[in-house]
Amino acid sequence: MERRSILIAEDDPTTGRVLEDYLRAHGFATALVRTGEDAVVSYRQHRPDLALLDVQLPQLSGFEVFEAIRQQSGPYVCPVLLMSAVYTDRARAEHFERTGIRAEAYLIKPFPLDWMLSTVERFLPPRA
């Protein structure tokens, strides 16, 4: 059976490795990138089942990557989970209201890994 794939865009090496190791340990294939531009390229090449994007990435922000993914998705809409240690719930709500960004979920760091996993599983599309 093919493993579900998750694109992880996280510029902090430690956080990225923890997320990648945890998701791999739970049966997912992962692609870890450190910049927004690399996230867009990786999305185009691999078409993951879900994208987990840090909001503050070098080159392109997670919000900009989100928009690029939505523009490229065609009939398939890749679920996107945004994450940040900087944006509070209020700041996130204000930003989303201004920009119209509607990600499937928003994770405020630090978050429990088991909660992140259940959120990922909740938004993964059903297997074909």
Image (cartoon, grey):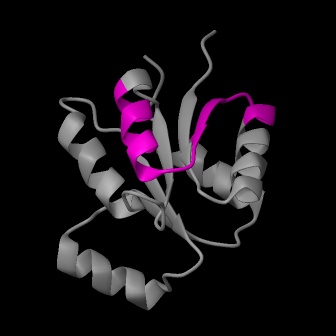
Q: Looking at the image, which is closer to me, 14 or 25?
A: 14
| Left or right of residue 97: residue 6 | right
User: Which quadrant, please, contains the N terminus?
Assistant: top right
Considering every residue shown, the one lying at the far bottom of the view is 90
x, y percent for residue 54: 52, 60
Q: Is residue 24 above or below residue 15?
A: above
Q: Is residue 120 visible?
A: yes
x, y percent for residue 90: 42, 90
Q: Is residue 23 above or below residue 44?
A: below
Q: Quadrant of residue 109?
A: bottom right
User: Which quadrant, please, contains the C terminus?
Assistant: top left
| Left or right of residue 64: residue 111 | right
x, y percent for residue 113: 75, 57
Question: What residue is rendered at 19% in x and 80% in y?
Answer: 98
Total tally of numbered discs in the picture: 0
| Left or right of residue 36: residue 119 | right
Q: Is residue 114 visible?
A: no
Q: Looking at the image, which is closer to me, 94 or 59?
A: 59
Considering every residue shown, the one lying at the far front of the view is 59
Question: What residue is rendered at 58% in x and 54% in y?
Answer: 10
Q: Is residue 65 above or below residue 44?
A: below
Q: Is residue 43 magenta?
A: yes
Question: What residue is rendered at 81% in x and 34% in y?
Answer: 25
Q: Is residue 13 magenta?
A: no
Q: Is residue 35 above or below residue 110?
A: above
Q: Quadrant of residue 23?
A: top right
x, y percent for residue 75: 19, 29
| Boundaries of the magenta span | 24-44
Q: Quadrant of residue 73?
A: top left
